[in-house]
Image: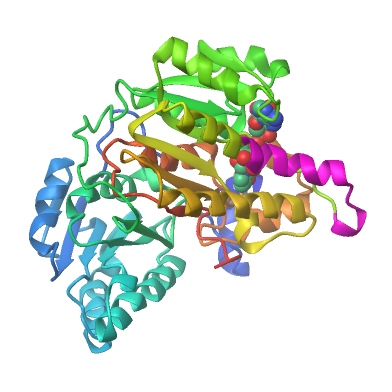
């Protein structure tokens, strides 16, 4: 399941052809290796707002080397506190900070701009803060070199919750996440962040991962285990052999079965007394144009992708099995945001996952959060079956000119799952290399 075009562009003849024909040239994306430093290089910190004084300290807590003076050396990351920009005229400060250092960036650079959620502001300040979205999304499309650019809106009072988000967005863990807007502290989130060991943030936590036997689910299980969690994997009975290679704690069930929620709840209750992290990853596509669609196929996609996660979540919450500061995580899709030919059922189910996040984010008790990832083109068995031409378009039509890997989705989920991500609630982050499709 390798990307043959990308391998070709790195060959001698490929390099010549890419240069002369102006073909897309996908950069090699660095991925995080367990135990490695979060950032291999220096991060330049700038801007003047309510975070300016604390940013250096926060990065220090992550063992990230930062500086406030560019000094002409190479830079791995740029963090700009834009919370102090209160009018459209102030926005020129972005250009003044970024332009002089854009040519000093190393490969796979990371850019994070921090703002205040515009919906919490009025007048000119609201205008200026809203502008940050257009700035970061545009920079994401031109930065190149496998770089990523994100905007993090932090509500006042939630500055302390930034740590896990900076750790994710500045490190290779966010290799395929770019042009995203993250909101911290805007929805029903408790302020107190749990102290965690940054190398093993999920120590002592129990995570349920559905669809864990292969593909993205298998990788989610591995990354959560790497971060210290005990993973309970779930998949359909025919996948048992694969599932037990992923984890020794597992449940075989079809999540749509009438008794599945009760079965899951009693397993978690009896073995662990509860659960901290629930990842609703199991999902299917049964594509057909609507004109040719059949009720049972349309219904099945909805049942697996959204009704089952709703029922399982309701059961776990009702039985109070999700522990305080717990995490519920959905897997949506770019198809749920932009739509896709032949995918009316899948698109509806994946948009419903976003609705599920919206509906629960305001009402979950005990600091429990709910967020979702929306993967773009991720190279798995599911996408290997896509016809060549469609696959090529899917892989190239993004700012990275390549498909993502299951680990990119898994790392994003691990960031949500961290007990330190307390203020991160109600977000839908795309893992799509900043795909050109959709908002
Ligand atoms: P996959 O088909 O490789 O794996 C899905 C897993 O879910 C399988 O192990 C399968 O047995 C399990 N599963 C399916 N129906 C089930 C049921 N009723 N009960 C229990 N388990 C069930 O798919 P993947 O590519 O790894 O996708 C994982 C998730 O990511 C899905 O929700 C998918 O919609 C989403 N997604 C994938 C991509 C991509 O590009 N691969 C893009 C966007 C979203």
User: Is 227 rendered above or below residue 379?
Assistant: above
Q: Point out the quarter of the image occupied by ligand 1.
A: top right
| Residue plotted at (47% across, 40% down) | 329
Q: Is residue 93 above or below residue 108?
A: below
Q: Is residue 175 left or right of residue 198?
A: right
Q: Quadrant of the C terminus?
A: bottom right
- Is residue 284 in view? no
Q: Position of residue 130 (x, y in %)?
A: 35, 76
The residue closer to the viewer here, 175 or 293, is 293
Residue 212, image x, y percentages: 57, 26
Q: Main secondary structure of the magenta part?
A: helix
Residue sitting at 33 percent across and 50 percent down?
A: 169
Looking at the image, residue 178 sits to the left or right of residue 128; the answer is right
| Residue occupying the far right of the picture | 292
Relative to the observer, which residue lies in front, 311 or 235? 311
Q: Is residue 369 magenta?
A: no
| Place of residue 134 in the rendered image (x, y in percent of width and height, measured from the top left) | 41, 75
Segment tinted magenta in the rendering: 289-308
């Amino acid at each position: 399941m390798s990307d043959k075009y990308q391998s070709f562009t790195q060959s001698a003849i490929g390099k010549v052809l890419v240069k002369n024909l102006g073909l897309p040239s996908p950069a090699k994306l660095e991925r995080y290796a367990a135990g490695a430093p979060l950032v291999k290089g220096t991060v330049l910190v700038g801007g003047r707002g309510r975070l300016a004084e604390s940013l250096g300290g926060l990065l220090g807590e992550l063992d990230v080397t930062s500086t406030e003076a560019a000094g002409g050396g190479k830079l791995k990351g740029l963090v700009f506190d834009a919370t102090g920009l209160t009018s459209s005229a102030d926005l020129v400060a972005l250009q003044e900070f970024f332009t002089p250092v854009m040519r000093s960036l190393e490969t796979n650079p990371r850019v994070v701009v921090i703002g205040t959620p515009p919906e919490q502001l009025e007048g000119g300040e609201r205008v200026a803060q809203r502008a940050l979205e257009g700035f970061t999304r545009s920079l994401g499309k031109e930065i190149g070199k496998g770089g990523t650019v994100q905007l993090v809106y932090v509500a006042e009072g939630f500055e302390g919750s930034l740590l896990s988000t900076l750790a994710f967005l500045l490190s290779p863990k966010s290799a395929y996440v770019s042009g995203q807007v993250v909101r911290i502290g805007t929805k029903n989130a408790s302020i107190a962040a749990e102290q965690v060991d940054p190398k093993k943030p999920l120590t002592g936590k129990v995570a349920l991962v559905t669809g864990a036997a292969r593909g993205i689910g298998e990788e989610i299980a591995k990354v959560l285990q790497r971060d210290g969690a005990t993973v309970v994997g779930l998949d359909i009975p025919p996948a048992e052999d694969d599932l037990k290679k992923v984890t020794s704690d597992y449940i075989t069930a079809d999540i749509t079965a009438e008794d599945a929620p009760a079965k899951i709840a009693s397993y978690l209750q009896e073995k662990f007394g509860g659960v901290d992290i629930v990842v609703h990853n199991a999902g299917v596509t049964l594509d057909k144009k609507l004109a040719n669609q059949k009720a049972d196929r349309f219904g099945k996609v909805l049942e697996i992708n959204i009704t089952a996660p709703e029922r399982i979540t309701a059961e776990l919450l009702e039985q109070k099995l999700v522990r305080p500061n717990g995490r519920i995580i959905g897997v949506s899709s770019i198809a749920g945001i932009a739509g896709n030919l032949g995918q009316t059922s899948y698109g509806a189910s994946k948009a419903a996952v976003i609705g599920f996040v919206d509906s629960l984010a305001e009402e979950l008790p005990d600091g429990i959060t709910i967020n979702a990832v929306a993967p773009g083109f991720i190279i798995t068995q599911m996408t290997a079956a896509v016809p060549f031409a469609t696959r090529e378009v899917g892989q190239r039509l993004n700012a990275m000119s390549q498909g993502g890997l299951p680990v990119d989705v898994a790392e994003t989920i691990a960031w949500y799952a961290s007990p330190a991500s307390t203020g991160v609630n109600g977000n839908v982050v795309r893992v799509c290399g900043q795909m050109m499709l959709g908002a």
